[in-house]
Amino acid sequence: MVAFQKMTSGKFLFWMFGIFFLLLVSSGIFAALGVPMNGTFMLQVFFYGLLFVVFYFGGLAKEERGLLFTKKKLSPGKLMIFVPFFIGGIINILYTLFLERFSPGLHQSYLEASDLMDQIIGEVDVLGTSLLFLSVVILAPIVEEILFRGIFFNVLGKKHSTLFAMMMSSIVFGVLHLETMVPTFIIGLVICFIYQQTGSLLLAILAHFFNNLMAFVMPYVLVGRSPEDPLVLVMGSVLVVAFLFFTIYFIRYVLKNRETLKEDPPMHRVLLDAVKAENGSPFYDISKPLYSGMPVYEGDPEVLIEPVATVDKDGYALNALFFGSHSGTHMDFPSHFMEGGKSMEAFPLAKFYGEALVVDAFWESIPFGEKKVLARSGYLTLNRAKALVENGVELIGTVHESIEEEPPYEVHKFLLNHDIIILENLHMDHVKRGSYTLCAFPLSIKGAEGAPVRAVLMDDLPRNP
């Protein structure tokens, strides 16, 4: 999974609605001061630039920006560029009829918002038209696709199902378009599916560009023409046919490719491919192997592996194993330090599997709610252990033979008293900081106070939606 070191869904919403509020306030001030319309268009251009800088540079790390425009799949064809506009057209007709029937007041407000371009055409000069074109046709598709599909959709997809991420990113996209939120939500959902299926943010931008280009050009073509004008009649007939054709085409496309909803969002898939290419697979073994004479914690039994039978002499091979329950990579359970404490079988298997955060050291800032935390270096102090427990942690891992530097084992006792599993003696030199799926099942030893573990990080398995 992409770590998204700087961005969370909560931060995205806070920044987005904060900047949107500033735009509304600024527009209101401009209107109250009687600033010419060109000034308002300049303001829109400025805010699109602000959104791009804040989210692209302030919200993404350098390596995350590199993943944004890398696609996994080939595009399905140029027709996908036209789909959002024509599906949006038929949704617009149906939504208008619905409002006319059930909400006349909202219907009038929606018509006024839809006819805004018609009102603007006769009031702007060449500069105004150029600024409006730059804002609506050029900047909006680029910035909005990077923000809503490229960033927000992928951020949501880190912790939620792909379908949930598609819905929520499209809902927020629609809400920010005020009166036209319902058709915009549908258009956003269509573009999001195209992006999810193809992995191409560029294709999503082009589809958004065509939608906005048509919405920009059509009022100029039809301005001043009556409904009986031959051009209006011909264009209307062609559009109706196109609406139906592209709607059927897209429905068939979705049904044919519905399995894509079971895959991770595109940025996560690209990272998974890169990990497979570099590592040979998405799996990282973070266990230390057991072997005779290996280093053990002071006072623990030595590890001894001796052959009992060999293929050469006996026709089969068999080894005798002698080692302590805390040899190599292992887990500590409460009974390790507490009389009558829980042993291994008291913990459900789910405790040993799930999303884990790998950090460089325990002192790093760790997001609230992280259940499993593994540190690549350093020991854990009692104060930091208390903070992690308050943060909701359930399992803590270290690369050292002990999670604390020396006796009297206050950190062990505190963690185990709170049923926090301790995973020790990991090998993580080859693992980068970020989120992974941890699989660390201990040997099934009845009544064990500790047990050796084969710990593996996965980066990452597709999520079941």
Image (cartoon, grey):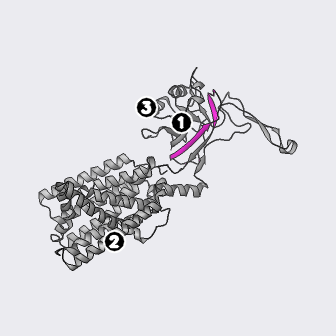
**Label 2, on which residue?**
242
What kind of element bears circle 2?
helix
Q: Which residue does the image show at 60% across and 38% down from the upper left?
A: 441
User: Quadrant location of residue 142?
Assistant: bottom left
- Report the amino acid beneath label 3: Glu
Does the magenta portion include 435? yes
In the orientation shown, which residue stands out farthest toward the front?
A: 101
| Classed neighbour count for the residue bearing mark 1: other residues with Cα under 10 Å, few (<14), some (14–19), many (≥20) | some
Q: How many marks?
A: 3
Residue closest to the far right: 313
- SS at badge 1: helix
* Residue 267, disc: none
Residue hosting label 3: 390
Q: Is residue 82 visible from the viewing direction of this image?
A: no
Q: Nearer the viewer, residue 245 or 62?
A: 245
Q: CA distance from mark 2 to mark 3?
A: 58 Å
Residue at which label 1 appears: 351
Q: Position of residue 173 (x, y in %)?
A: 32, 55
Q: Classify 233 as above or below 2.
A: below
Q: Which residues are magenta?
A: 428-453
Residue 270 % position (x, y) = 50, 58
Kindly check if marks 2 and 3 are in contact, taking CB atoms under 8 A apart as contact: no
Query: Which residue is found at the position 59% from the left and 27% from the top?
Result: 343
Q: CA distance from mark 2 to mark 1?
A: 54 Å
Circle 2 packing at 10 Å, graded few (<14), some (14-19), many (20+), is some
Marked residue nearer the N-terminal end (3 or 1): 1
